[in-house]
Amino acid sequence: MPLYMDIHENVPAGTTAADVAGAHEMDLKIQEQHGVDYRSYWVSEPEGKIFCLVEAPSAEAAAIVHRESHGLVADQLIEVVEGR
């Protein structure tokens, strides 16, 4: 199954790492319904960016989980090729 890195570049001002942790937990609650596995995430508070590593059957499936769980859809979704 493809692996993707999603990038949230327009994070609302004042969003904290704790807020992102809560959103990630919301993703985990529904991801199985879409055959998705949100593996990890990283937060850069100074840059106002969030990065999520996700295994999904498609980029759209990954986006649907974010949309349905908390509404914060990534600005970019890039397929990651492992081992290169």
Image (cartoon, rainbow, N blue to C red):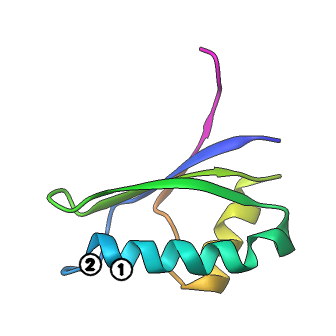
Front one among 23 and 6: 23
Real-space CA distance between mark 2 and mark 1, rounded to the nearest whole angstrom: 6 Å
Mark 1 falls on what kind of element? helix
- The reply to whether dot 2 and dot 1 touch (C-beta < 8 Å) is yes
Give the magenta-colored segment's residue range. 78-84
Front in this rendered view, residue 22 or 44: 22
**Residue at point 69%, 62% (across, down):** 62
Q: Dot 2: within a 10 Å radius of its alpha carbon, few (fewer than 14), some, or many (20 or more) residues?
A: few
Q: Which residue is drawn at 40% across and 73% down?
A: 20
**Of discs 2 and 1, which sits in the foreground?**
1
Residue that label 2 marks: 15
Q: Along the line of sight, which residue is nearer the eye, 44 or 73?
A: 44
| Kind of residue at disc 1 | Asp
- Residue, far left: 46
In percent of width and height, residue 8 lies at: 40, 62
Is residue 80 highlighted in magenta?
A: yes
In what quadrant of the picture does the N terminus appear?
top right
Residue designated by label 1: 19
Q: Can you say whether 35 is above or below 24 in the image?
A: above
